[in-house]
Structures are given as C-alpha cells and as structure tokens.
Image: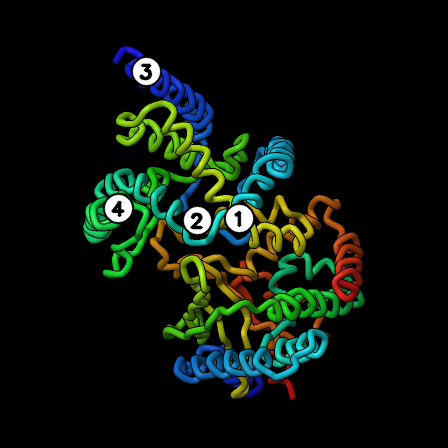
Amino acid sequence: MTSSKEQMNGTGRLFRAIAAAATGIALSACAASTEGQLSTVDDVNDPFEPANRVVFAFNEAVDTVVIRPVAVTYDTFVPEGIQQGITNFLRNLRTPIILANELLQGDWEGAEVAASRLFLNTTLGLGGFIDIASYAQKEYQSEDFGQTLARWGVGEGPYLVLPILGPSNPRDAVGFATDVFADPVGYAATDGFNYARAGATVVDLRQQTLEATDELKRSSIDYYATTRSLYRQYRLNQIGDGAGAEAMPDIPDFEDIPEDEGAPVIDDGSAEQGVPGSAIPVASE
Amino acid sequence: MKSLATALIWLLLVAAAPVRAADPAQAQSFIEGLGQRAVEILNEPDLDADRAVAQFRTLFRESFDIPTIGRFVLGRYWRTASREQQQEYLELFENMVVETYARRFTEYSGETFRVLGSRGEGEGDTMVQSQIVRPAGPPIQVAWRVRERNGQFRIIDVSIEGVSMAVTQRNEFGAVIQRNGGRIEPLLETLRGRITAARQG
C-alpha cells in the first residue's frame, strides 16, 4: 500500500518537474509569439536557430546511438501483428486525453469518435490491443493540448528544438506538458507502468517513422531545415484536422513571364503587385 | 490612345488567362492515368531495375512541370542568380527530382493507389486527392496539385499528409543559400554532387 502510494508521488513529481521546466521555457517565449499560421512561405520563424541546431545535433546523436538501433531491433524481431497491437494499445491509453482535447476544442463529432473508440477498444478490443472501432469507421485521430491552444487562437511562438523531445514551439511544449500532467492514466497506473509506457511510446513512434526518416536524411541537403519545415506544416495540418486547404502555397504562372525581359516582376509567390512583363511588349506589336 | 487601348485589352486577356476554370474531372483522370501507367511499369514481366528507373524518368519528365516547381523552390533567389546559374539550376533540379523519385518508385512493396476526388485550388489549379494504401499501417493521404496549360495537365506540387513538397524543398534550399551568405553557387555545387551520387547508387 505505502509503496504504491510512494510510486504515485514519484511519478507525480517527475511529471510535475517536466511540466514546470517546459512551461518555464515556454511562457517567456510565448509573450513574443506571432500568428498561428505560416505567415508567408519563407518565414521560417526560427530566431534561436543557432541554439536549435546544437540541440538538433545532440538529438540526432542520441537517436543514432540509442533510439534508432532499439527501434530497428524492435522492427526486425517483433512480428508485425504484435507491433500493430502495441500501437493500438498505446493509442488507447492516449484516448482519454484525446477525448478531453476534442471537448476543449468544441469538436463534438471528434469527441463522440474518441469516446466510442475508448469504449469499443477497451472492451471488445481486449484492453485496446485490437482497433475494433476502426472497422466501424471510427478512425484514430491524434489530438493534443498544443492543437487545442491553437484552436483557441494561441500563436505557435518561435520554433524550438527540445532535448530528446525534438521539434516544438512554446505553444506545443506547454501543450505536451499539460497533456502529461493531466493524463488520468498516468495517475491511475504505477510508476513502473508509466516508465514502460513512455519507453514503449518512443520506440513505437520511432519504428513507424524509420523508413521516412532514413529516406529524408538520404535525400536532404539540410536535414535540420527540412525537419523544421515538415514539423510546422504537419502541425498546421493536424490543427485543421487534415482539411489541408490553408497551407497550400501560391505558385505563380512562371511561363507567362518571358525569360529575356529583364528582372521578372513576379517570381516568388509573395510579390503579387505589378503587371506581368509580357503584357506591354505583346501590345506594341 | 489606340495603342493604350490595345495594351489594356491585351493586359485583360493575359490577366484573365490563368483564371479560366480548369476541369477538375479531367485533372482527376490525368492522375488516374498516371497511376495506371506506374502500375503497368511495375507489373511488367521480367522487370529489371535499370529499365524501370528509365521508364519512371520519362514518366516524371512528362507529367511534372519541373521548371515551374524549380523556380518556385528557388523563390526570391531566382532574381539574384545569373542567367547561366538559372539555367544550370533548373537542369540540376530536374535531375535531382527525377533521380530521387524514380528510384523510390521502383521500391514497390504491395501498395495500392486510389484516387478519391478533386477540388479547385488557387486560380485554376486542381487538387486531386488520393490514398496510398499500404499492407501495414494506415493509408497515406497524397494530394496532387495539377495545373492545365494549353490543354496539357502537369503536376506542380505534391502534398503528403498536408505537407507541401514544394514548400519543404523551398525552405530547405533557402536555408542552404542563407547559410552560405546568400550565394547560390554552394547550392549548385551540392546538387551536382547529389546527382552524381544518386546515379551511381
């Protein structure tokens, strides 16, 4: 009895410490936060780039030495069916927090899906290992408090690379800490279970992205810049629940601008003013 | 006065040209056709890797508007590049895209491709929504941005799970140029190396 209570306190302390640290970093930066959207395609919103690159390099080293090898081993030796079961189980553990965030966002449809998933998968899905709900068109959708804050109009703030946790920003860091702090599963379970869950989550997520990250690293020239761009676009898409309409860039019709008319008037998608250089010369013929 | 009127009429015509409504259904069947051609290449009996890559190179060059994507990706640095640099850049960009993606397409492992629908995007473009269904894991949402020009359809961007490849590439090239003091030459240098390496790989 006493030992389990101590464990709970221990877990609480750990989460509180993480939450406090993340909130501390975040609040100072939040004051200077900008709009929640990518204001222009070229605004990378990264005033701390030199520091971020150092942390990014550190994270890459940890990934190369520890996380990726573990994920590769897991990917190689654990049968796919069991991997899928573990993914389902971990997602089911996250569902109470997803449900809470759907409610906080006022997304009643999403909340209904999350509640059905929690009920169906915990019971018929044998504690979450089988995603029964997805057969009833109740698909998994990831929600977190960072997305909720965005829906409430909180700007992302500057891009940040957090140690171990990776790409983030003040809004998403506060969101992450809040989710961890508020998670009822974290309070109900033992310390040992919570550590195992955290470890399994890292391996599960890393395993799912093995191919994609290997490919990206091979094909990109500046992996840091690619990751930054991907993170910010991906988050925008998540916040919009995959609607994806707002993030499309303005791609001009370049072929309307003759190559030999000097400096092109429109060439970067941000300069909309001005007349295409082709109009006047054509008229003078 | 007369020449001014002519100029205005031409201006209206030129400005109106890209706004004319493209046909989303046609753009959709263009993407469906591409998917079928890709599957045909992959299903060829006695497929050898080199020939498949060669066929995908052709398919890419025909169906992507690589000059438009390339210029968009270079962004404001296009203006600062010399004529020779612009030309070399477009060639390098085309080769980079073709080498990277042609090889990736031949690493086929049981995925199926499904076109779901389409909608208008921007001024006269069409986003064709599709799904790549994998043997394991959730399907990947891929949207193809298609632009019509003189009755010809061309892809100008690919969006994977809401992430624009053109924007990602533009942000990356922008970072490389910025870190080299705004000079384009180091980017060209890197691209040359990349293409040589990809062709050997």
Q: Chain of mark 1?
A: A
Q: Earlier in the sequence, mark 4 or mark 2?
A: 2
Nearer-the-camera pick, B35 or A252: B35
What residue is disc 1 on?
A: A75
Q: Given the image, what chain letter belongs to the residue carrying mark 3? A: A
Same chain for marks 4 and 2? Answer: yes
Question: Dot 4, how many residues are within 10 Å of its Cα: few (below 14), some (14-19), or many (20+)?
Answer: few
* Residue A145 position in % (x across, y down): 33, 38
Q: Return the residue at label 2.
A: A83
Q: Say what amino acid the circle numbered 1 marks.
A: Asp
Could you tell me if residue A107 is visible in this image? no
Q: Residues within 10 Å of mark 1 (few under 14, many from 20)?
A: some
Q: Residue at x 44, y 35 (%)?
A: A33
Query: In the image, which is nearer the foreground, mark 2 or mark 3?
Result: 2
Residue occupying the point 72% across, 75% down: B50
Choose the circle earlier in sequence order: 1 or 2. 1
**Mark 3, secondary structure of its residue:** helix
Q: CA distance from mark 4 to mark 3?
A: 29 Å
Judge by depth and name the residue closer to the eye, A159 or A184: A184
Q: Do residues under tags 4 and 2 come within 8 Å of each other at their CB atoms?
A: no
First in residue order: circle 1 vs circle 3: 3
Q: Nearer the viewer, mark 4 or mark 3?
A: 4
Q: Position of residue A40 (x, y in %)?
A: 50, 52
Q: Amino acid at mark 2?
A: Gln
Return the residue at label 4: A126
Colouring rule applied to residues: rainbow
